[in-house]
């Protein structure tokens, strides 16, 4: 395990902004990860764990301590009658793992095709898309616990999953280094098709689509929205959706309805989540004066998706934050809702 110094982080992220890591190490094993944590503790350095860099905004000052990049590989498979259990190294590329599962004929994560990043990054915000979330198939997460100084197997219940959250990005932030994630998938299972974009894609077709057809469809739909990392597509130099869809109370929902009616607009919301309502953040952004393709210096909004803030080539983190602040302020002024960023802001 080699500890390097002053390593540029910008090329290790999809948004391609940010400064250097004072120290940097790549862990290819659980032992490497443990040794790296010990190094940071011995030297009293702040530790940041990096996966695929697809959900981070790194400050122009970089990271003053140790960046621990997780490259732990390996996929182990264990079959029982109705499920197949896969233990997947946290450093595996997420989309390659989905491709593998689909090729093995196992259902449960096909709608999450095309999401960039690592396997270890997915439990953090309970990654979801097109009607599926990883919390539906994760059975446990193996993680090095920085408090207890040992690797623990956390059950799905321990992870406290809900919409774009888990204990890893809330109450236990920075406590765990995830080394492996276990998923229970359904061999021979049918693909999930509930999401409107997918229904439209397959409308009029005879017979049900296969897992692999759904995977291809999801990747095509994502590509059209700039939500697939494609070299040469400037709209994909982003961190995906920059804002979470706000979940509002009944009172806030009433207030939003009133504001929408004043403007002769129909409020776009997702189906009610228990007592609450999930509102489309993209709708709020677009109805606050920001359009797809909006430009602000070296930054802007993707021409294909209103929620993706993009680096137009030479953006600094400060410029991205400037655009984020502007959108948050404007949406709050018009709709009375403060949008919450989805990517993790690092080193600010
Ligand atoms: C084009 C594009 C499309 C996207 N579409 C979606 C989408 O549809 N749905 C969705 O939910 N997200 C989406 N994202 C966001 C992102 O891809 C996911 O959140 C992804 O799971 C992040 O994984 P990562 O390995 O890149 O994490 P990173 O960006 O490297 O890190 C993100 C956070 O996770 C932590 N982390 C990462 N790995 C570990 C580990 N092994 N142990 C402990 N902590 C760790 C980091 O410390 C950080 O806090 C998209 C991003 C892009 C760029």
Image (cartoon, rainbow, N blue to C red):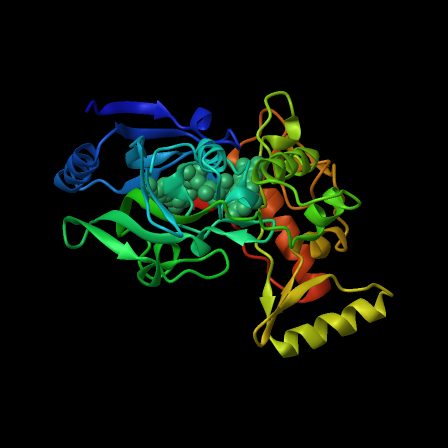
Residue at the image point whose x is 39% and y is 54% from the top: 169
Residue 134: percent from the left, percent from the top? 45, 51
Q: Is residue 187 left or right of residue 338?
A: left
Question: Is there any visible trace of residue 222 in the rendered image?
Answer: yes
Whole-percent x and y of residue 308? Answer: 63, 41
- Residue found at x 65% / y 46%: 307
Instruction: Give the residue displayed 43% in from the left and 55% down from the top.
Output: 135
Nearer to me, 334 or 39: 39
Q: Is residue 348 visible to us here?
A: no
Seen in the picture, residue 45 relative to 270 is either above or below; the reply is above
Image quadrant in which you'd find residue 76: top left
Q: Nearer the viewer, residue 185 or 34?
A: 185
Tell how many labels: 0
Q: In the image, 208: left or right of 19?
A: right
Quadrant of the snapshot with the C terminus: top left
The spot of residue 298 in percent (x, y) is: 64, 30
Which quarter holds ligand 1? top left
Q: Nearer the viewer, residue 318 or 135?
A: 135
On-image quarter of the N terminus: top left
Q: Residue furthest right?
A: 264
Name the side, left or right, on which 208 lies relative to 247: right
Q: Is residue 228 left or right of residue 139?
A: right
Quarter of image, res 229: top right
Q: Residue at x 25, y 23 (%)?
A: 4
Residue 266 to residue 92: above or below = below
Residue 245 figure quarter: bottom right
């Amino acid at each position: 395990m080699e500890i390097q110094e002053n390593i540029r982080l910008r090329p290790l992220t999809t948004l391609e902004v940010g400064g250097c890591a004072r120290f940097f190490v790549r862990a290819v094993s659980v032992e490497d990860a443990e040794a790296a944590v010990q190094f940071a503790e011995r030297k009293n350095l702040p530790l940041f764990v990096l996966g695929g860099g697809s959900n981070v905004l790194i400050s122009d000052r970089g990271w003053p301590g140790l960046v621990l990049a997780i490259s732990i590989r390996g996929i182990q498979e264990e079959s029982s009658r109705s499920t197949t259990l896969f233990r997947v190294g946290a450093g595996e590329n997420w989309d390659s793992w989905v491709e593998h599962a689909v090729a093995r004929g196992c259902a449960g994560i096909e709608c999450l095709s095309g999401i960039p990043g690592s396997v270890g990054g997915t439990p953090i915000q309970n990654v979801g898309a097109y009607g599926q979330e990883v919390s539906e198939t994760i059975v446990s997460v193996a993680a090095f616990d920085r408090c207890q100084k040992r690797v623990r197997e956390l059950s799905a219940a321990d992870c406290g999953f809900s919409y774009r959250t888990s204990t890893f990005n809330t109450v236990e932030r920075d406590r765990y280094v995830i080394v492996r994630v276990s998923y229970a998938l359904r061999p021979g299972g049918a693909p999930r098709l509930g999401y409107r974009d997918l229904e439209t894609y397959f409308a009029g077709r005879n017979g049900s689509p296969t897992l692999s057809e759904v995977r291809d469809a999801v990747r095509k739909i994502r590509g059209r929205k700039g939500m697939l990392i494609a070299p040469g597509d400037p709209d994909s130099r982003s961190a995906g959706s920059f804002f979470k869809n706000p979940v509002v109370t009944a009172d806030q929902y009433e207030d939003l309805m009133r504001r929408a009616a004043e403007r002769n607009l129909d409020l776009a919301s997702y189906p009610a989540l228990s007592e609450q309502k999930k509102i489309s953040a993209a709708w709020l952004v677009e109805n606050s004066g920001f359009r797809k393709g909006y430009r602000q210096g070296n930054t802007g909004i993707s021409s294909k998706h209103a929620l993706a803030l993009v680096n137009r080539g030479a953006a600094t983190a400060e410029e991205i934050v400037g655009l984020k602040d502007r959108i948050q302020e404007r949406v709050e002024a018009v709709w009375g809702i403060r949008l919450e960023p989805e990517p993790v802001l690092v080193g600010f």
